[in-house]
Image: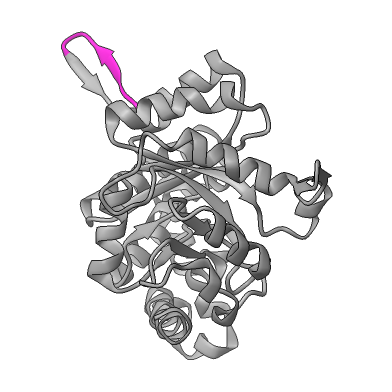
């Protein structure tokens, strides 16, 4: 699957993943009204508005980007209708030819991890039919419980051509409370990176990168550059650009000499661009056009920094 993602990045000349993380406050009034007229004041109406919002943004950006990353928590907040909207979003993005990274951050003991893996990147046999419940291409995984929590996912990566992004050095301000702790002279995030490399050594694609990849935040550029130098087969999902404060100048060290090795996430900066003063002239009615403009600006920004 990592080969497919890199192929898409090369095709679009944009190492960009759009985080489809809608919140009620982001949804323009005309979409909310349309959904409420159909479903009333219900969770179904909110879920419908999330899907319609996503759909318009995908329609306006799918020719520019290789991938999307829906964050499942935004949908789970709406209960069962929200989870259905999450699945509809995945299917729609696949129809548009996009790679889908399910941002689920699961991490549990072996038997439970196995069911998460089946549900999100695997399949279930029902009679004569093989059904893929969520059918994402990649998922994000929390490694805190160790190999027991990872192996069920890597097993399915092998059989279903899927991939995982394991949390390594995350972009949030308090990540250092655990991830930067020093153990035998090595920070925890580097210990995790060594495990990620080990877990992925049998899943290296023709591109030279593994289906077992890492989440490394743009807000810590020195650590990103350090990990790139030490782990050349490790592909990075890079959050923290834009709304979290990191700019393109901080990102050059995350990529290899060919400009490969990572994909940069932007969520609020793209899907809520119409609320940004820079794109305010588009207005709420043309929110998806504002998102397209934000993607084009991000692409230009990354080209100057990364190549």
Q: Residue at x 39, y 40 (%)?
A: 163
> Residue 123's image quarter?
top left
Q: Nearer the viewer, residue 95 or 16?
A: 16
- Residue 28 % position (x, y): 50, 68
Vertical placement of residue 277 versus 27, above or below: below
- Residue 282 % position (x, y): 44, 86
- Viewed as shown, does residue 147 lie left or right of 163? right
Q: Residue furthest left?
A: 128
Q: Nearer the viewer, residue 230 or 136?
A: 230
Q: Nearer the viewer, residue 47 or 110?
A: 110
Residue 188, magenta (yes or no): no
- Viewed as shown, does residue 13 lie left or right of 232? left
Vertical placement of residue 124 versus 282, above or below: above
Q: Tell me the quarter of the image containing the N terminus.
A: top left
Q: Is residue 77 visible?
A: no
- Residue 8 % position (x, y): 26, 61
The colour scheme of the drawn protein is one colour
Q: Residue at x 47, y 19 (%)?
A: 115
- Viewed as shown, does residue 240 lie left or right of 207? right
Q: Residue at x 22, y 68 (%)?
A: 11
Q: Is residue 303 visible?
A: yes
- Residue 84 % position (x, y): 41, 37
Q: Residue at x 45, y 28 (%)?
A: 153
- The stretch of residues the image draws in magenta is 122-128
């Amino acid at each position: 699957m990592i080969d497919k993602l890199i192929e898409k990045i090369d095709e679009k000349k944009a190492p960009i993943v759009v985080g489809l993380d809608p919140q009620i406050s982001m949804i323009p009034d005309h979409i909310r009204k349309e959904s409420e007229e159909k479903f009333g004041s219900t969770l179904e109406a909110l879920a419908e508005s999330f899907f319609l919002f996503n759909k318009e943004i995908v329609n306006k950006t799918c020719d520019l980007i290789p991938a999307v990353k829906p964050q499942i928590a935004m949908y789970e907040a709406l209960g069962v209708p929200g989870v259905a909207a999450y699945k509809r979003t995945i299917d729609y993005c696949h129809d548009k030819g996009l790679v889908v990274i399910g941002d689920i951050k699961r991490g549990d003991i072996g038997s439970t991890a196995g069911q998460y893996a089946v549900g999100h990147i695997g399949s279930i046999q029902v009679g004569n039919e093989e059904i893929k419940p969520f059918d994402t291409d990649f998922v994000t995984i929390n490694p805190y419980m160790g190999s027991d929590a990872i192996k069920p996912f890597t097993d399915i990566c092998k059989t279903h051509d899927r991939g995982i992004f394991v949390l390594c050095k995350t972009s949030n301000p308090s990540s250092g409370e655990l991830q930067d702790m020093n153990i035998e002279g090595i920070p925890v995030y580097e210990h995790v990176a060594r495990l990620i490399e080990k877990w992925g050594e049998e899943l290296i694609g023709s591109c030279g990168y593994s289906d077992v990849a890492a989440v490394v935040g743009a807000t810590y550029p020195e650590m990103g550059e350090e990990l790139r130098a030490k782990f050349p087969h490790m592909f990075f999902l890079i959050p923290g650009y834009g709304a979290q404060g990191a700019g393109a100048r901080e990102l050059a060290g995350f990529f290899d000499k060919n400009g490969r090795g990572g994909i940069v996430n932007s969520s609020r900066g793209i899907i809520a661009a119409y609320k940004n003063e820079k794109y305010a002239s588009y207005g709420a009615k043309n929110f998806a056009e504002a998102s397209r403009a934000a993607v084009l600006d991000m692409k230009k920004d990354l080209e100057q920094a990364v190549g």
